[in-house]
Image (tube, rainbow, N blue to C red):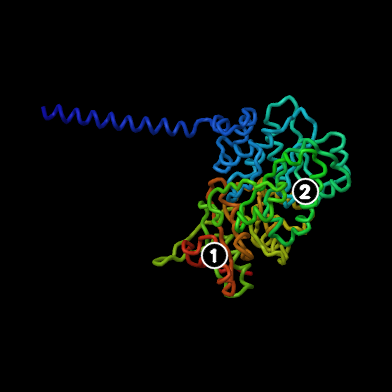
Amino acid sequence: KKSILIKMLYYRVWLLLLYTISKALVYNHERTKPHQHDWDAIGVDPRIANALVSMGAKIPTQVQCRAIPKMLKGEDCVVHAPTGSGKTLAYLVPIFNQINPERQAIQAIIVVPTRELGLQVTAVARRLASGTQTQSRIIVMPLLAGSKLRRQRLWAWASPPHIIIANAIQLEQMIRLGGLKKMPDLRIFVVDEIDAFFDDESLITDRNALKASFLRLKDFTTKSNQRQHIFATATIEQPRYFVQSKLQDWCQGRQPLYISIGSKRSPPSTLSHFFTCCSEPSKRLTAARKILKKRLLLQTENTTIFSNVVTPPVLIFFDESRPLHQFAQIFQRIDGHRVGILTPDSDLDQRAKALADFRSGRIDLLLATDLAARGLDLPQIKFILNFDPPKNAVSYLHRAGRAGRMGNTGSVITIIHEKERFAFERILNYCGLLDDLPPDILLSSPVNT
């Protein structure tokens, strides 16, 4: 009898174990099966859902799940979510969902702070347009720094696009010069990286141009009270005050809905953060070259371990006063790296080529100013090097946010000298990183300068 009871007990345990495993497999299958139904569940047109799946966006992110249903109802929205969380599709999907492809008229305008971000958003929008099965194709027109306004004006007159993706100055010029006349079908107006227009001193002219465009659009659109306004950002201080004091007037007095996702003061949790302290500012280049040669020692309380965190491609941020071409020659001629440069002073074609080469792997180092810190989606990056520390916490968050996107891992190393330590620790404290930051990285193996 005892043996029978033992066998029955074993039998029940095995049944329970098999049941648990089967439930886990079913749950896992539900999570990993094709997610078109997830897009459907938040109100996305099946044709657009299919296009998203073909682009690799099989499942909506948290910010997309929160924002898209509200936008589809026509509500004005401020979307405040961390870098790399999917904000671009969060506003593109509702635009595509509401556009009438059969109506050849401007129905949506998206304003971005930089040409590079505009090119990126244009590429995503065109991929979505090409994958959406409609009788008439949705046309996307970029109106960015370096665009030939005469050609764009003729395009807008002869065959109006459905979507315009613009920089603020070019949009204002296009409206002022008569390139964009009455737009009764304009339904959605988006401003991406809205905080940059207010916080970045170099964008004061852009902010004035953006405000001027808003004022002109009030006269141009016959149903301005029905036009939807969407603002996207990763970093704004005092968001409620920002919305009420700066954005409510732009929404014809309506209170936009504030949608907040995740921690706004912290970079992606998948990133690791390190720093190294130089005795003199002149030693930065030596430190950077050692880091790029993977000559790192991470000092812990009990031991010193070799760290191999640096893997190309690497995005290196510099202060705008630095002679990047001189650094590029050193990294290229002496250390053998393939180097590109991205600065506001670079020729527009050179900027485009540098980004294209970096994305394709033709170069392994991209030397950049904070021009590259906002919005750019470079999913292959796992390593950020701050040759110069950022000026503030917002800049640190945007720089760090070029890595660790959509849940990927990455590392950020910042080079400082002793006089910068206090200011840098304040940045880390703001970002919630000070207590968790490892001690100073020790640089081993001397490098000839």
The numbered disc on residue 395 is: none
- Horizontal side of 117 relative to 20 (left or right) equals right
The answer to whether any part of residue 418 appears in the image is yes
Q: Could you say which quadrant of the image residue 430 lies in?
A: bottom right
C-alpha gap between disc 1 and disc 2: 43 Å
Q: Is 210 or 28 nearer to us in this picture?
A: 210
Residue, x 69% and y 37% (percent of image)?
Answer: 95
Residue 100 image offset from top left, x and y in percent: 73, 30
* Callout 1–callout 2 Cβ contact below 8 Å: no
Mark 1 sits on what residue?
275
Above/below status of 82 relative to 389:
above
Position of the C terminus, as image quadrant, is bottom right
| Figure disc tally | 2
Mark 2 sits on what residue?
214
Above/below status of 29 relative to 445:
above
- Horizontal side of 438 relative to 169 (left or right) equals left
Residue 155 image offset from top left, x and y in percent: 85, 38
Residue, x 78% and y 58% (percent of image)?
Answer: 205
Under tag 2, what secondary structure? helix
Position of the N terminus, as image quadrant, is top left
Amino acid at dot 1:
Phe
